[in-house]
Amino acid sequence: MFINCPYCRSLVTTDPATDRPPPRCPDCGGPLGAQAEDSAAGASDSPTGSAKIDWVNDATAGTATADSAPASGDEKHALTDSAPEQIVSDVSVGAVPEQTAHLEEDTPSISVSIPPSRPRITRHAPSFVRAPAATRPRTRSRTAIAVILALSASLCLQILLADRARLAESARWRPLLEFACDALSCDLPPWREPGAFTLLQRDVRQHPTVRGALRVSATFRNDARWAQPWPRLQLSLSDANGRRAGERLFEAREYLGGSPEQAVLGSGETAAVAMDILEPAPNIVAYDFRFR
């Protein structure tokens, strides 16, 4: 059978033959059976009422008391008066560390669990838009791509320059060709747009002093984006019946009265026409100017 130790509450095995517990608890050393009753009575008679008893010293004291003769009344009072000091001394010397160690072993440890901090939520983009991992740069591939681009640009430039005479007639390509030729010191053919010459004033009348002659005067302007060479002037004369009596193309030196000072007429510039011609037929009443 088993009994509970009144001090440490541990199970103690009793003697199978006599069914009595051992004299002392094997765990805490506390007295069991008759010794437990004597110790409890001694503790209750103590003035301090302390429950802490040195079981080892108490056993020695009990043995000594049993062997010795009963003390007188004065000796009993002396022993009673000195009991608190002896108990405190005995407890402070040997009982407290052992009992404290035993209590520390029996007391369950309390662990305080601190909840972990919430992990920071990181939002990732979908896998199909995630940036690829950095790869080792391929120097050779980049060099090859740069060489290919340079050769392609050079080829395109050569095509532009080789066909610049035809491309220069296009208002779309001419600005690019002018930029390239300024950098490479090449020449472009002049811009030709006869329809951009605007006739501002014109007049054909009889010559005041020469009979059978006509005096022609006109003013025109270059409205093109670029300078143009001097145009050729086409003059047509008709009679009263609407029949064409004469027609001719005049060069710049003819309708200007001499060679022009500059080879081209700049954009927005004007020029004056003044010349005398022979009347191809009498009764000329209509005329027409065109630039070629």
Image (cartoon, rainbow, N blue to C red):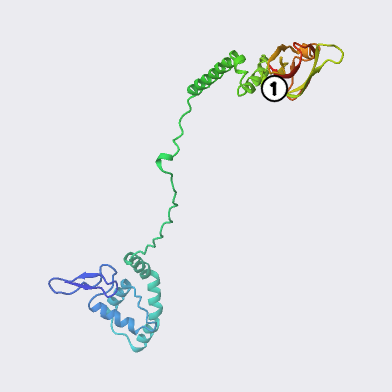
Q: Secondary structure at mark 1?
A: loop
Residue behind mark 1: 226
Q: Amino acid at mark 1?
A: Trp
**How many numbered tags mark residues here?**
1
Q: In the rendered view of the protein, which quadrant contains the N terminus?
A: bottom left
Q: Is residue 217 above or below residue 127?
A: above
Image quarter (top left, top right, bottom left or bottom right) of the C terminus: top right
Q: Is residue 15 above or below residue 212?
A: below
Q: Is residue 157 left or right of residue 290?
A: left
Question: Quick one: which residue is furthest to the left in this view?
Answer: 17
Q: Is residue 274 visible?
A: no
* Res 74 → quadrant: bottom left
Residue 3 image-quadrant placement: bottom left
- x%, y% of residue 46? 36, 83
Is residue 121 left or right of 214 when viewed as pictured? left
Identify which residue is drawn at 43% across, 44% down: 125
Q: Residue furthest bottom?
A: 73
Residue 207, x across and y down, in percent: 83, 15
Front residue (pair 58, 101): 101
Q: Where in the figure is residue 252, as x and y percent of width and height?
A: 75, 13
Q: Is 75 in front, or is 98? A: 98
Q: In the current view of this chain or complex, which residue is farthest to the front? A: 241
Q: Is residue 282 visible?
A: yes
Image spot of residue 10 (x, y percent): 25, 70
The residue nearer to you, when weighing 107 against 52, is 107
Residue sitting at x 32%, y 85%: 71
As drawn, 135 above or below 144: below
Q: Specify few, some or many for label 1: CA neighbours under 10 Å numbering under 14, 14-19, or 20 or more.
A: some
